[in-house]
Image: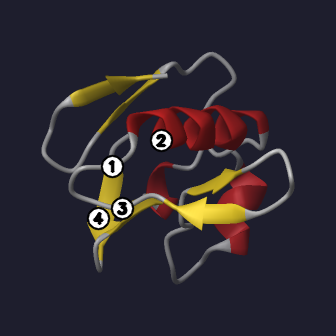
Amino acid sequence: MKLIAEGGLLYYDRTQLHDEQQRQWFPDSNPILLVIYDAGDCDTIHWPDPNKDHLRRALYDGRECGYTGPRDTEVTLPDDTTFYF
């Protein structure tokens, strides 16, 4: 999956979402990547120069929620580099 940068933040490409239901939830917009902290607060992932630990955690949580496939361990960032999580 390739992530999209919009307005300085990272988003999933809704057309590449793994789960059909997820694609239906976002018919006109791309879902934003969020890092959710243990205390329940959340934060966005900035682009360029994302916090790699936060990005890894957001992608892991996104995989658990069905945004990517259950075996996916990498994404392509907007600059075409590969990021492993």
Q: Is mark 3 on a helix, strand or loop?
A: loop
Question: Who comes first in sequence, dot 1 or dot 4?
Answer: 4
How far is mark 4 from mark 2, CA to CA? 13 Å
How far is mark 3 from mark 2, CA to CA? 9 Å
Q: Which amino acid does label 3 sit on?
A: His
User: Residue at position x 60%, y 44% from top?
Assistant: 58
Q: Where is residue 46 in the image (x, y as percent from the top left)?
A: 36, 61
Q: CB of mark 2 within 8 Å of CB of mark 1?
A: yes
Q: Nearer the viewer, residue 62 or 25?
A: 62
Q: Where is residue 4 in the image (x, y as percent from the top left)?
A: 32, 59
Q: In which quarter of the image is the N terminus?
A: top left
Mark 2 surroundings: few (<14), some (14-19) or many (≥20) residues within 10 A? many
Q: CB of mark 3 within 8 Å of CB of mark 2?
A: no
Q: What residue type is labelled 2?
A: Leu
Up/down of 29 relative to 67, above or below = below
Give the labeled residue for mark 1: 50
Give the labeled residue for mark 2: 55
